Amino acid sequence: MTETFSLVAPLPSATFGGRVTSHGMGAEALVRAAELQSDRLQRALGESHGLLLFPGMDELIRKPVLLLRMSRVFGPHVENYRGTGMTPQMVHAEVPEILLVSNDPKVSRAPPARPEPPLTAEGALPTRYPHRRGWHTDQSYRRPPPDVSLFLAVTPVPQGQGQTLFADATAAYEALPDALKKRIDGLEGLHAAPGTGRRRDAVLAGAVPRALAEHEQSQRQPVVRIHPLTGQRSIYLCEYGQMDWLDGPFIGMEKGPSGAGAALLDTLMTHVTQPQFVYVHEWTAGDLLVWDNRSLLHAATWFDAGRYTRMMWRTTVQGNPGSAYAADNGREYQQPNSQSGF
Ligand SMILES: O=C(O)CCC(=O)C(=O)O
Ligand SMILES: [Fe+2]
């Protein structure tokens, strides 16, 4: 990439992503170099289809402000979670741009449910929808949604659980049959915030919908997103917990969890999460992953919260959502409910 950084791409056993190392430079020096070469790193992120791993960033755990500085490399605005109504115990005490993603009792975010059955027929970790649920792109229930997330492993759980899965929604879009590309061109998905009672299972169970306040309303998003830096198209969607299954999942299609919209969403999610588009990240303490929410979907996996306490730090970077959001830029934002964050 430059003399300062080396990029090894793709990530092991994947067709996308890249690993950035810095020739023995300490993490603080790496952050300084990254600040001077933010264009190059943003380009590397695009060329890697939206996923960069910086291993060995343990120093950021001791100096959390470095994570904030590193976040600014990837966009103009880093969300301050104290300003948007996030539950206080989920926000880092010194650097309020850091969201704590943890099952620690002080934070108390439970891991995702274990898939049923826990393994595939071949004995592997299930990654494909619908066996694996929870695929999403961060905060797609807001307009504009954030561009990039940074995720630092402070205390990961032992490998084999607590992974993060990524699906390359650009390659998945390119691989769609032309007829399906045509069908989704111009279509909008309706994305719902967690806690608003519009999950697929809640609607299937006949839950009575509650009225939503202005800041909780589900938001329309283009299904085919055009990346503002690379110009590439990708599939921008979530599934069970982050689409509106009452008034959506798509605008202008048959609504509800069993309608034509649901069938299309199932087809698309099953397509995007095929193994050839998916990378499984096993975490090591000090790993910093940077992912582009404009072109990747991701999902967390189960871990044994009775045995392990997992602590991860996340920041979200905003400010370049693309021309589809021109009318939304500069909008004030408030978290729709206290447990949001995905
Ligand atoms: O816990 C994880 O591995 C991922 C969590 C996640 O999706 C997020 O914080 O955006
Ligand atoms: Fe997420």
Image: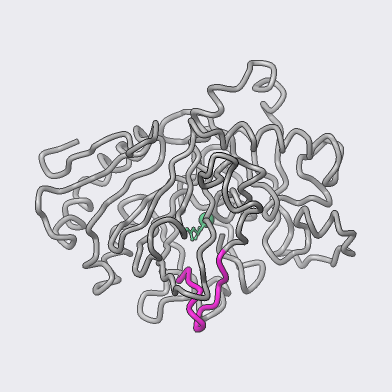
Q: Residue furthest front?
A: 122
As for residue 200 lying within the magenta part, the answer is no
Residue drawn at x 83%, y 49% as measured from the top left: 247
- Picture coordinates of residue 107, whole percent (x, y): 51, 78
Quadrant including the N terminus: top left
Q: Residue furthest bottom?
A: 106
Horizontal side, residue 19 vs residue 123: left or right: left
Q: Identify the magenta region.
A: 100-111
Q: Residue furthest top?
A: 178
Q: Main secondary structure of the magenta part?
A: loop
Q: Nearer the viewer, residue 275 or 24?
A: 275
Q: Quadrant of residue 64?
A: bottom left
The answer to whether residue 180 is above or below residue 158 is above
Q: How many marks?
A: 0
The answer to whether residue 23 is above or below residue 27 is above
- Picture coordinates of residue 9, whole percent (x, y): 29, 34
- Picture coordinates of residue 8, whole percent (x, y): 24, 37
Residue drawn at x 43%, y 41% as measured from the top left: 279
Horizontal side, residue 129 vs residue 295: left or right: right
The answer to whether residue 36 is above or below residue 252 is below
Colour convention of the picture: one colour
Quadrant including the C terminus: bottom right
As for residue 107 lying within the magenta part, the answer is yes
- Picture coordinates of residue 171, whole percent (x, y): 49, 28
Residue drawn at x 79%, y 45% as measured from the top left: 248
